[in-house]
């Protein structure tokens, strides 16, 4: 039985038909044998009958004839039977072979198709032109492959789209990441410049304050100069007055000298009159006259000097008045300067405050940009990962050889598919470049590792309960 | 802006990749120069070669820490990819509650960034166990390679805008108001998270016991495929059977390259 189980369908069928033929043959042989025994018995009966004595000749001849007919019939039947048997066996084997063929041929076709599907080739066509269960099986098989083909086609195109889409996302998030990084560095530069401006503005404000203070003190100095100038004018007026007084006194002295001179002349006249006795007195009078002349000269000189002095004081007064006016103007201007510088200082301080606010704002922008950098970097890395997985999915789907025209597809998908395939080809070629890059990396890395003895692991030494 | 030459870029990114796993391809040149510009200025380096020499000569780790702080991308927010937290609360925690007999839950947030993820996990755990929480040791391990961001995470200060994505009861129970714009994580919850600096590229993981749950979301997107596979293998080794690994939704483990079994999108289980 076990042996029978392991036989192929064709062999099983042939075995069955051969068994059937053998059984038929055996039945036939048994029939022949039975007929032969009947014949033998008839012969024995005939022999026995011949041994009966008082038997008519007619009966004997009838008996003999019957026997002869019997034997002849037996022989001819035997031949017919053998021929029918041989024919039966031949037909049985022939029909067996034919049936076996009609069963195994479509089965073999199905086996072949199944093998192809197993190998990932879904591009199979199964046509069985019979009406039996095998044909049903074939139809179901066709339906099944068509369905799988359809599903796989969808998966394939979806995989291609996902691969292309995720690649695009990866690229754009990479771009985003780069942009954010550039933004971050620009902002850092901006922050640096603004800090510089800020310190400059602070310096300006300080300088302006200092200048304002200086202008203030200058103003005070000028005011003081002005008041002192007024005092000086007063002093000069006083000098003028004293000079006038001196001038008057000198006039008095001049008069005294004149009168002294007249008195001395009178005395000289009196001394000449007295002659001998007035000799000494005449000398004295001469001396007094001399003194009076010298006094008059000195008084004249002093008068000239005092007049010069008065003129100079007048001149000085004029200059001092002008200086006072100039000083007054200086005071006015310095007040203006002080005001302006004060305004500059205030503006600079306000500027400094504004700049520090700008700085704060930029700090916030910087924080956001830092966050954006991290976000875009993370999404770039994640989408790259996703892209490689989509690629993997695509490779898996590519293992199936799909039928181009499925029962469920229409021209539209065909066209879009070819587009996608082109995208895919580009994609995979760029991917190869990428993988080559990666492939080249290890040699460099190993060199790097060998030439780099400093290695800081950056691990903590203990992990609490862990 | 200091520009970087092809060789300098290769040298620097090779160093970063070999030691810290972060893979920077040619398209990241802008990122590298943009982020490191100031570091160069601060260290008085005129170009990247000088910086690289300084980096290799520095034994204190100061420069490399600065480099890592600058080069890592710390992007996260509360309830990010919230499906994971739902699954963690509805499926993982009940399972752990029934199966962990020593009441020691070991949950690791690998690449915790500014702390939103481990704090959220701690909140979910605290809410789930409620009054029975005191019978459980459910401190979450949170690691990151950047000490700058860890400092921020430990600080636990978040703007109200950041906190707003959390459910109202979480906001009420686990935050104190600092001012009109900022909230702080309460100390009790802070104590439920152990923040440590850890480099996922480390050859050997130094952990004493196996983990029940590992969250490592949107971290491996910065690694190349080889580093990623190695890391996933190490995760597998340091996990209890039945342990759950959460990765980012844009990531996935390739079936025939890992021993982890797929559960749901971006959720895997150790068999």
Image: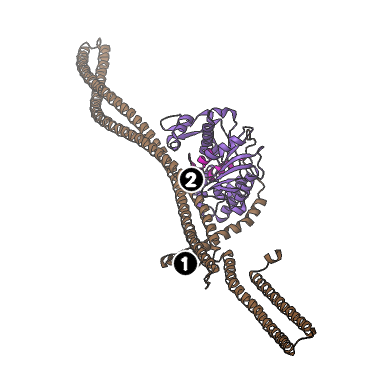
Q: Nearer the viewer, residue A263 or B210?
A: B210
Label 1: which secondary element: loop
| 2 or 1: mark nearer the eye | 1
Instruction: Say the numbered circle drawn on residue A406.
Output: 1
**Residue at the (22%, 10%) spot, across then down:** A274
Q: In the image, A460: left or right of A207?
A: right
A195 part of magenta stretch: no
Q: Nearer the viewer, residue B252 or A231?
A: B252
Number of numbered discs visible in the structure rendering: 2
**Vertical relation: B204 (above or below) B124:** below
Question: Residue B152: percent from the left, percent from the top?
Answer: 52, 36
Q: Which residues are magenta?
A: B61-89
Query: Badge 1: how crowded within 10 Å, few (<14), some, or many (20+)?
Result: some
**Vertical relation: A448 (above or below) A9:** above
Res. A314 in view:
yes
**Residue at the (56%, 31%) spot, across then down:** B192
* Label 2 chain ID: A
B72 part of magenta stretch: yes
Q: Nearer the viewer, residue A132 or A135?
A: A132
Q: CA distance from mark 2 to mark 1?
A: 47 Å
> Quick one: label 2 or label 1, which is nearer the N terminus?
2
Question: Residue A371: percent from the left, percent from the top?
Answer: 46, 43
Query: Which quadrant of the structure image shows residue A132?
Result: bottom right
**Vertical relation: B250 (above or below) A51:** above
* Residue under numbered circle 2: A374
Question: Residue B269: percent from the left, percent from the top?
Answer: 59, 45
Give chain B's shade. purple
Q: Nearer the viewer, residue A351 or A247?
A: A351
């Amino acid at each position: 039985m076990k042996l029978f189980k392991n036989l192929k369908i064709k062999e099983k069928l042939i075995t069955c038909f051969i068994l059937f033929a053998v059984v038929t043959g055996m039945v036939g042989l048994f029939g022949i044998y039975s007929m032969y025994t009947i014949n033998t018995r008839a012969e024995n009966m005939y022999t026995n009958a011949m041994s009966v004595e008082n038997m008519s000749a007619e009966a004997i001849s009838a008996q003999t004839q019957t026997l002869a007919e019997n034997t002849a019939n037996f022989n001819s039947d035997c031949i017919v039977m053998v021929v029918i048997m041989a024919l039966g066996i031949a037909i049985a084997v022939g029909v067996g072979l034919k049936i076996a063929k009609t069963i195994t041929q479509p089965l073999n076709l199905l086996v072949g198709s199944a093998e192809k599907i197993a190998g990932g080739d879904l591009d199979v066509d199964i046509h069985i032109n019979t009406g039996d269960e095998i044909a049903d099986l074939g139809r179901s098989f066709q339906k099944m492959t068509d369905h799988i083909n359809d599903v796989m086609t969808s998966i394939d195109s979806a995989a291609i789209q996902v691969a292309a889409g995720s690649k695009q996302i990866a690229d754009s998030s990479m771009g985003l990441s780069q942009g954010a990084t550039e933004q971050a560095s620009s902002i850092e530069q901006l922050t640096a410049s603004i800090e510089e401006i800020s310190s400059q503005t602070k310096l300006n404000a300080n300088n302006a304050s200092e200048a304002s203070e200086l202008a203030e003190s200058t103003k005070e100095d000028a005011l003081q100069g002005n008041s002192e100038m007024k005092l000086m004018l007063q002093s000069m007026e006083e000098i003028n007055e004293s000079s006038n007084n001196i001038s008057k006194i000198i006039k008095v002295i001049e008069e005294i000298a004149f009168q002294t001179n007249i008195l001395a002349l009178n005395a000289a006249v009196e001394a000449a009159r007295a002659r001998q006795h007035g000799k000494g007195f005449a000398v004295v009078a001469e001396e007094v006259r001399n003194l009076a002349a010298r006094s008059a000269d000195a008084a004249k000189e002093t008068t000239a000097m005092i007049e010069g002095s008065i003129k100079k004081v007048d001149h000085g007064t004029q200059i001092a008045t002008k200086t006072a006016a100039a000083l007054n103007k200086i005071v006015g201007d310095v007040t203006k300067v002080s005001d302006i510088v004060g305004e500059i200082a205030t503006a600079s301080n306000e500027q400094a405050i504004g700049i520090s606010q700008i700085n704060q704002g930029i700090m916030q922008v910087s924080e956001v940009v830092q966050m954006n950098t991290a976000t875009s970097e993370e999404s770039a890395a994640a989408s790259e990962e996703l892209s490689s997985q989509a690629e993997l999915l695509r490779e898996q789907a590519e293992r199936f050889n799909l039928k181009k025209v499925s029962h469920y597809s229409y021209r539209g998908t065909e066209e879009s598919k070819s587009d996608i395939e082109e995208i895919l080809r580009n994609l995979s070629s760029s991917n190869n470049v990428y993988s080559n890059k990666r492939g080249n990396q290890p040699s460099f890395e190993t060199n790097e590792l060998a030439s780099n003895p400093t290695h800081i692991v950056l691990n903590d030494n203990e992990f609490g309960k862990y | 802006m200091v520009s970087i030459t092809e060789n300098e870029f290769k040298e620097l990114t090779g160093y970063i990749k070999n030691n810290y796993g972060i893979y920077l391809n040619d398209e990241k040149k802008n990122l590298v120069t943009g982020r490191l510009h100031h570091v160069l200025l601060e260290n008085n380096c005129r170009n990247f070669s000088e910086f690289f020499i300084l980096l290799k000569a520095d034994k204190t780790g100061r420069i490399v820490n600065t480099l890592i702080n600058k080069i890592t991308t710390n992007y996260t927010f509360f309830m990010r990819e919230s499906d994971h937290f739902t699954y963690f609360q509805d499926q993982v925690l009940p399972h752990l509650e029934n199966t962990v007999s020593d009441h020691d839950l070991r949950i690791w947030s690998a690449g915790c960034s500014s702390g939103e993820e481990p704090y959220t996990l701690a909140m979910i755990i605290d809410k789930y166990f409620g009054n029975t929480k005191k019978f459980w040791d459910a401190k979450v391990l949170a690691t990151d390679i950047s000490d700058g961001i860890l400092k921020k995470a430990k600080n636990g200060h978040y703007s109200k805008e950041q906190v707003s994505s959390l459910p109202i009861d979480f906001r009420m129970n686990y935050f104190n108001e600092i001012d009109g714009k900022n909230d702080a994580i309460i100390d009790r919850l802070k104590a439920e998270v152990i923040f440590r600096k850890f480099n996922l590229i480390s050859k050997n993981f130094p952990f004493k016991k196996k983990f029940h749950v590992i969250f490592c979301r949107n971290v491996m997107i910065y690694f190349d495929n080889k580093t990623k596979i190695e890391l996933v293998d190490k995760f597998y080794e340091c996990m209890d059977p039945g342990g759950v690994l959460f990765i980012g939704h844009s990531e996935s483990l390739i079936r025939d390259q890992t021993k982890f079994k797929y559960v749901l999108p971006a959720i895997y289980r150790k068999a």
